[in-house]
Amino acid sequence: MTDITHETVEHYAKLANLAFDPADAELLARQLGSILSHVEKIAELNLDDVPATRFVLPQEPAHREDEVRPSLGAEQALANAPDTESHHFLVPKVINVK
């Protein structure tokens, strides 16, 4: 198992701006060490003859031909809006600029 220390977990948590109970650092260190051990084991495999795959199961292309269709008019697009003005949505101000 890869050794991850309590201090390493706290260091990376600080870099990632994560906060957790310091008592959990030891558990996280063991769990991360276990994950890294599995990754190291996978890295030992010779995968040269394994083709790269995007999907496990065969997939049909999800693409379709572009088709020009009429879009919604302003009245229809704004029909369910709670508040409008001059063909625009009105929304409450959420950013206070000082």
Image (spheres, rainbow, N blue to C red):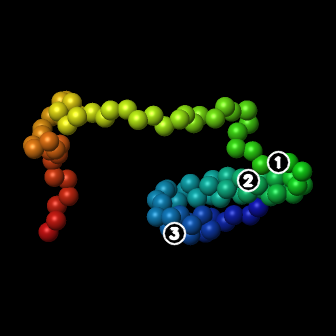
Quadrant of the rendered image containing residue 30: bottom right
Q: Nearer the viewer, residue 96 or 79?
A: 79
Residue 15, relative to residue 20: is it above or below? below
The N terminus lies in which quarter of the figure?
Answer: bottom right
Residue 92 or residue 13, whichever sits in front: 92
Considering the image in quadrants, where does the C terminus appear?
Answer: bottom left
Q: Nearer the viewer, mark 3 or mark 2?
A: 3
Q: Is residue 5 left or right of residue 90?
A: right
On the question of residue 1 being in view, the answer is no
Q: Residue furthest left?
A: 85
What's the residue type where badge 2 is placed?
A: Ser
Distance CA(mark 3)–CA(mark 1): 36 Å
The circle drawn on residue 15 is: 3
Which amino acid type is marked by label 1?
Pro
Report crowding for label 3: few under 14, some 14 to 19, many 20 or more residues within 10 A (C-alpha).
few
Tell me the tag on residue 37. Answer: none
Q: Is 55 displayed left or right of 18 in the figure?
A: right
Q: Earlier in the sequence, mark 3 or mark 2?
A: 3
Taking the image as drawn, is residue 76 in sight?
yes
Residue that carries the numbered disc 2 in the rendered image: 34
Position in image of residue 91 (x %, y %): 17, 45
**Which residue sits at x=10%, y=44%?**
86
Dot 3 or dot 1: first in sequence order is: 3
